[in-house]
Amino acid sequence: MQRLIVLPMLLALLVGCAGKTYKVDHPVVGPAPPRMVEAEQYAQANAELESDIQQVGYSKTGDEPLRMTDVVARVNGTPILAATVLEQYASRLEQARGQVTKTQFREAQETLIQRDLDRYIEQTLMADAVKSKLKDEQLEAIEAQLDQFFSMQVEEMKKQAKVETLADLEAVLQQQGLSLSTMRKMFGDRQLASEYVRSKVGDPPPVTREQLTEDYHAHLDEYAQPAQVKWQQLQITIATHGGKSAALIEMDKALNELRNGAEFDDIVKKYSDGPLASNGGHWDWVQPGSIANPKVRDALAALDVNRYSDVLVSENTLQVVRVTGRREARHTPFEEVQDAIRERLNKEWKEQRAQAIVDELKDNAVIETMFDDRPDAGQKTVSSLETRGRSAGLAG
C-alpha cells in the first residue's frame, strides 16, 4: 500500500515563492492589442460564476476538501474564491489528492490559503478601488482591453494544454477545479491592482549625493573586494611519466629552457599536462585562499607579479606557478556604484510607498476570512476593526 504523504512534505512539494509583486513603473492597462477575442463568452462565463459561488463555514477545518468556488474571504463584500488563491497550485494539488486523506488534503489547502490570502485581499482592495472611480462606460472599456490581453494568455494556455478550442481548454481547467471565468477574473484583478499602485505611487524625490554617500558607507561591506591573483600553471603529472623520478627529469628540462629565456607560455604548451595547458596554463582572477592545494595557495599569495615559484611537489603532481597579475583587497569605488545605489533607493521608496497605500486601503476596509473565528486567528490574516462606507474607503 502506498504510504501517505505527510502534510509538511506535501506543502513543501506544492509551495514556491509567494512574494507580493505590484508593478509600479509602467502602466498595465494601456492601448489594446490588435487581436480580438470572444468577450461575450467571458462575460457570460463570469455571470455563471456569480451564481455558482458558495460560502464556506468560517469556524473550523472541514473534513471535505474545499471546492474552487468556495468563498475563503470577503473584502468589503467582494468574495475571494478558493480558486483565486489555489490556482497556482491546482495541478500539483490534483496530483497529490490521491496520496493523502481528505482531511490532510483540506489541511494542505487551508495552509496554502492562510499563507497567501493577505496578498489577494490587498489585490482585491486595489482592483475595487480602481473600479470605484470609473464610470460604467470607462470600466467597460477597460474590461474590453483586459479581455484582449487575456486572450493572449488563453492562446498560450491552449498551446501548453495541447488543445485547439476554448471548450477543450475549459475541460482541461475543470479537471483541475478551475475555469476560464475564474482565471479571467484573477487576471483582471492582478492587472487593476498593479495599475492602482502605479497611479498612486508617483515619482520618488530626487536622491541627493549626501544620501548616496551615506548609503554607500552604510553598506561598505557589500562593496568589499578581496585580494585576487591571475596566474599560470606548469603541471607535470607523476603517473603519466611512470613515476616521480621521470617526472622530475621532465620538469628539469622545462626549467632549464625557462632559465635560458624561453617564454613561460611556450614551456607550458610544450611540457604541461594541466587542464589549461593548451592556452599557456592561464587561470583567470581568483582569491588565493580559494585554491585547494596549500602549496599552490601559499606560493600565489607570496609571489611578485611575473615571478614563478620553485617546484611544488605533491602526491600526484609537480607544479610551477607564475603570478601574472595581482589585485590588492579594496572596496569598489563610490563612482562605480552610485547609479546602482540610486536605483535601489528609488525602488525601496516605491515599495514603501506602495505598501503604505495598501495599508491605508486595509485600514478602511471590512475584511472577513475563513480563519477569523479560530483561536489563532490573530496570527493569520487580520480583519479590519473599522467599518466605513465602501466608497469612502476605496477613494484613498
Image (tube, rainbow, N blue to C red):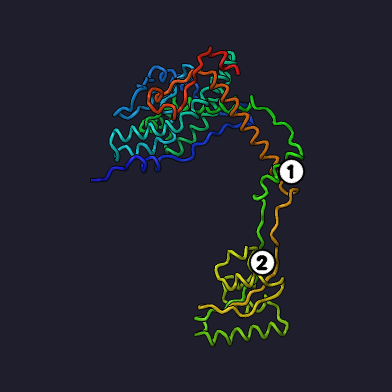
The numbered disc on residue 213 is 1
Residue at figure coordinates x 31%, y 43% from the top left: 5
In the image, what residue type sits under mark 2? Answer: Lys
Answer above or below: position of 306 versus 194: below
The CA span between labels 2 and 1 is: 32 Å
Camera-side residue: 312 or 24?
A: 312
Horizontal arrangement in the rendering, residue 43 relative to residue 324 (left or right): left
Q: Vertical placement of 71 versus 215: above or below?
A: above
2 or 139, which is in the foreground? 2
Give the amino acid type for the residue marked by disc 1 in the picture: Thr
Mark 2 or 1: in front is 1
Closer to the camera in the image, 341 or 77: 341
Horizontal side of 175 relative to 286 (left or right) equals: left
Q: Which residue is disc 2 drawn over?
A: 230
Question: Which type of secondary structure does the marked residue at label 2 adopt?
Answer: strand
Q: List the single residue furthest toward the top.
A: 389
Mark found first going from the N terminus, 2 or 1: 1
Counting every numbered tag in the picture gives 2
Q: Name which quarter of the figure residue 28 lies in.
A: top right
Quadrant for residue 113, please give it: top left
* Residue 373 percent across, percent down from the top left: 38, 22
Residue at the left extreme, as displayed: 1
Whether the residues at callouts 2 and 1 have beta carbons within 8 Å, the answer is no
Q: Quadrant of residue 22?
A: top right
Compared to residue 260, the image places residue 62 above or below, namely above
* Residue at 28% across, 36% down: 101
